[in-house]
Amino acid sequence: MPIAAIQDILDGKYAGKPVSVRGWIYRKRESKKTIFLVVRDASGIIQCTVKTDNPSWTQAEKITIESSVMITGTVKQDKRASGGYEITVEKLSIIGLAETFPITQDKSEEFLRDVRHLWLRSRRMSLIMRVRSEVLRFTHEFFRKEGFIEVSPPMFISSACEGGSTLFGLKYFGKDLYLTQSAQLYLEALIYSLEKVYCVAPSFRAEKSRTIRHLTEYWHIEPEWAFADMDDLMRVEEDLLSYICQKTAEDCKREIESLGADISKLKVVNTPFPRITYTEAIEKLTAKGFKIKWGEDFGYDDEKALAEEFGKPFFVYAYPRQIKAFYCKTHRDNPDLVMSTDMLVPRIGEISTGGAREDDKEELLRRIRELDLREEDYKWYIDLRRYGTVPHVGFGLGLERLLTWMLDLENIIDAIPFPRTTRRFYP
Ligand code: AMO
């Protein structure tokens, strides 16, 4: 007999028919004459009933929560059953009898994080993981559609991309190396042959901040492309975000509703996004009574206040040189500013940073010296400006920050299966 996906049964494809399902016991309830087993598989949950006269009764009595099972029976339409269908069991085989499952309803968040390897079985975590997978699919679809080529950057690196304070160091056969903070510099090397490239890869940050938006290991969506300016950059970025939001609202409606997240905020993500300069952002914040001065970087509270005003994703661009990285391209008509832009969303603040890269060798060298970086560490990167330099742009979008916003998650740690933070690296 074919093994049915539970969702297909709930969709009415097996009404009145014999069927087999495989899965795990989600809930169990007993009365004198019937045992009700709620079984879950990857697609959904369904109630299965075993009667006293069934030869499987003793198996059903013995079965425990989270035991793995194979059930054969007949699908019955029943308005009282959640989902509208149930299975009258003919045969129940226990595949793996579970010990007493440690997760019960009264457990604390902290406990659930300690047993993350088991908590991943919860309906909530499975729904999030499904949407995460779909968001990745839409990301790949978008870049392929736009002619970008997927590339694979290294994780071991010898010089910093985003500044020393968040670098994870490690010993590499006696030499000092680091874990990558961003693939950007390597992507820049690849545009000279492929022109438009992207990757989705882990980035590592020795980030001491314990906030709802910081991980030490996160997944980074990073495109980089040649012959492009800031306008092209913001256009591709907003197109990507609106593609992801629209497709997710369409294809993950059931998951989003089950998670209790607000689907309407995804549906209204349409291009063009509002754009304000850094200077305008400072003026807005000053008007709201914030103490921030021109030249200072935004804190989380500043970003949240700005984002509240827009209520949807928007760009801040043209930042002061002193708060941005060495690779940012200086505005030729105003050397105090660099061509850099952040995308901000409500509640989370910054979800991406991007910009035009300094493509002039002398300007780049000047920035490297100004920031006291070691020129020899960036020799290969400077080479890229020696041989056929081109104007180019790119951005980095944090997948988990994006999901935290899209799914109204309280904390970024629920956007990734095995979160790594300052305090958490088990399991
Ligand atoms: P930046 O350092 O701003 O820029 O990082 C880009 C995006 O990565 C995400 N992010 C994080 N997500 C979770 N936990 C963290 N600790 C964390 N740190 C960063 C955010 C952020 O917007 N190379 C540049 C980008 C570029 O210009 O192309 C970079 O890495 O969503």
Image: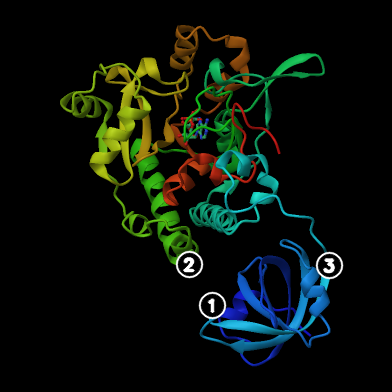
Q: Which amino acid does label 3 sit on?
A: Ile
Please give the residue where the numbered disc 3 appears in the rendered image: 95
Q: Under 8 Å from ligand 1: the CB of mark 3?
A: no
Asked if the residue at tag 2 contacts the one at tag 3, i.e. Cβ–Cβ closer than 8 Å, the answer is: no
Instruction: Judge whether 279 appears above or below 226 on screen.
Output: above
Residue count near mark 2 (Cα–Cα under 10 Å), binned few <14, some 14–19, many ≥20: few
Residue 236 x %, y %: 41, 46
Please indicate, yes or no, whether residue 288 appears anywhere in the rendered image. yes
Dot label at residue 254: 2
Please indicate, yes or no, whether residue 222 appears anywhere in the rendered image. no
Tell me the element at label 1: loop
Dot label at residue 83: 1
> Is residue 18 shown left or right of residue 269?
right
The first of marks 3 and 2 along the sequence is: 3
Q: Which amino acid does label 1 sit on?
A: Gly
- Of badges 2 and 1, nearer the viewer stands 1
The first of marks 2 and 1 along the sequence is: 1
Residue count near mark 3 (Cα–Cα under 10 Å), binned few <14, some 14–19, many ≥20: few
Q: Which residue is drawn at 56% across and 16% down?
A: 164
Separation of marks 2 and 1 at Cα, in angstroms:
13 Å
Residue 78 x %, y %: 55, 87
Rendered image quadrant of residue 302: top left
